[in-house]
Image (tube, rainbow, N blue to C red):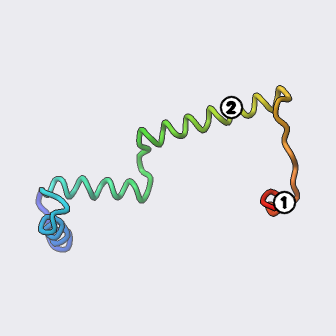
Amino acid sequence: MHFEGYVEKIIEAALKQGIAKTKAEALRLGLLELNQKYGLVVTDMEQRELEMDLAEFDRMEKRIAQGKTKLHKVKSIDEIFT
């Protein structure tokens, strides 16, 4: 790949500072940062956490339906923390 101008300066600075060893590595790091900022692709760990949260939510719903757990209504968020 060939980079010019501002992008080339960024890559060269990353190489000079030892942030990346190659232009390809600098590009990979940039793509990972882009994904982290915009959430373009869910990571395996994020997917597992989401699945665990959903499973816990299902367990809670079942306990409520079975009468093993009760929900308490509050008028405001302040009632929860006071």
In the rendered structure, are the residues bearing label 1 and label 2 in contact, judged by CB atoms less than 8 Å apart? no
Residue 22 image point, x, y percent: 12, 56
The residue beneath circle 2 is 58
Residue 54's disc number = none
Q: Is residue 62 above or below residue 82?
A: above
The residue beneath circle 1 is 79
Characterize the local packing of mark 1: few (<14), some (14-19) or many (20 or more) Cα atoms within 10 angstroms. Answer: few
Characterize the local packing of mark 2: few (<14), some (14-19) or many (20 or more) Cα atoms within 10 angstroms. Answer: few
Q: Is residue 65 above or below residue 40?
A: above
In the image, farthest residue toward the top: 66
In terms of image quadrants, where is residue 51? Answer: top right
Q: CA distance from mark 1 to mark 2?
A: 26 Å
Report whether 35 appears left or right of 64. left
Residue 41 image point, x, y percent: 41, 46
Mark 2: which amino acid? Asp
Find numbered disc 2 in the image and state the secondary structure of the residue it sits on: helix
Q: Residue at x 48, y 38 (%)?
A: 47
Report whether 54 appears left or right of 38. right
Q: Quadrant for the N terminus, please.
A: bottom left
Q: Residue at x 16, y 70 (%)?
A: 13
Mark 1: which amino acid? Glu
Q: Is residue 70 above or below residue 37?
A: above
